[in-house]
């Protein structure tokens, strides 16, 4: 498990690097959102507003197609939540490109997101079906109740460990690569430094930080929509 580094102390209170970087991401997203939306008009005249409306419209359509229009209508905040979660998740994965430690390399971060999804599943189930929703744990026969409970507990575990393992694995591989290149540079200083530090890491960063980071964010929101949507429809 990845251990968060402590970067700030106030008496006995310790603030981890994960929290600091998360706050940086939240602040950056809030500032960018304010700047992009402060001059919106009823009739779009700028390319920025046209793009934002296109992106939000596409997000709204994807959520409705995945969860069902009935679910989205009764849970109107689900669309902005899914969009915000994807942006925060993606930025948390991509911030490693700027030299920061990705919050998703800390299991606490992905577990917190998974627990929010877990609570939303039961919120949607009770909201749409009342307490009868819990009768599903006794199906097809009451004897399978322990197995059904294990299956429910497995959802947040799977949701949290998948992105955590993928992002942490990429970070470990890149750290080992840079150590190897550093050792190699002591053997062939004139050749290994430009080749090793410019040519070799770039495609790996594109895969682990960009492709895998965005892919894990997309998978997480899709699983969230599927789980919550199924709870609402059952």
Image: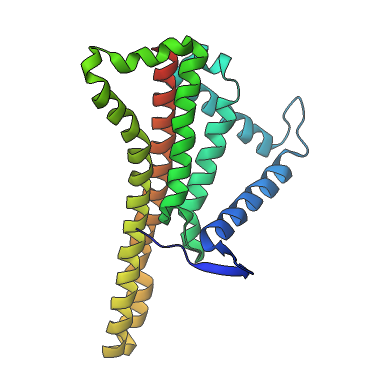
Q: Is residue 49 left or right of residue 18?
A: right
Residue 10 falls in image quadrant: bottom right
54 lies above or below 215: above
27 lies above or below 56: below
| Any part of residue 35 in sight | yes
Colour scheme employed for the rendering of this structure = rainbow
Q: Nearer the viewer, residue 164 or 156?
A: 156
168 lies above or below 146: below
Q: Nearer the viewer, residue 162 or 50?
A: 162
Residue found at x 66% / y 39%:
48
| Any part of residue 203 in sight | no
Residue 186 falls in image quadrant: bottom left
Residue 162 place in picture, x, y as percent: 33, 44
190 lies above or below 42: below
Residue 23 place in picture, x, y as percent: 61, 54
Residue found at x 55% / y 26%:
78
Residue found at x 31% / y 35%:
154
Residue found at x 26% / y 89%:
187
Residue 94 place in picture, x, y as percent: 47, 54
Number of callouts: 0
Q: Is residue 143 left or right of residue 28?
A: left
Instruction: Assign the N terminus to one quadrant of the image.
Output: bottom left
Q: Is residue 103 left or right of residue 197?
A: right
Residue 96 place in picture, x, y as percent: 47, 60
Instruction: Assign the C terminus to one quadrant of the image.
Output: top left
């Amino acid at each position: 498990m990845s251990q968060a580094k402590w970067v700030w102390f106030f008496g006995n209170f310790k603030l981890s690097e994960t929290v600091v970087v998360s706050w940086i991401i939240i602040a950056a997203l809030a500032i960018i959102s304010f700047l992009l939306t402060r001059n919106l008009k009823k009739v779009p005249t700028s390319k920025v507003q046209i793009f934002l409306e296109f992106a939000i419209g596409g997000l709204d359509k994807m959520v409705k197609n995945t969860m069902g229009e009935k679910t989205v209508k009764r849970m109107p905040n689900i669309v902005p939540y899914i969009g915000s979660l994807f942006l925060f998740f993606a930025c948390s994965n991509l911030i490693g490109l700027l030299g920061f430690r990705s919050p998703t390399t800390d299991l606490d971060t992905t577990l917190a997101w998974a627990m929010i999804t877990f609570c939303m599943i039961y919120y949607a189930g009770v909201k749409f079906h009342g307490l009868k929703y819990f009768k599903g744990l006794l199906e097809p026969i009451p004897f399978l109740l322990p197995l059904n409970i294990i299956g429910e507990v497995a959802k947040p575990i799977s949701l949290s460990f998948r992105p955590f393992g993928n992002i942490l694995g990429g970070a470990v591989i890149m750290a080992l690569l840079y150590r190897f290149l550093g050792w190699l540079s002591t053997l062939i200083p004139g050749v290994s430094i430009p080749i090793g530090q410019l040519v070799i890491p770039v495609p790996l960063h594109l895969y682990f930080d960009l492709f895998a980071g965005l892919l894990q964010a997309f998978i997480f929101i899709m699983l969230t929509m599927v789980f919550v949507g199924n709870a609402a429809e059952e």
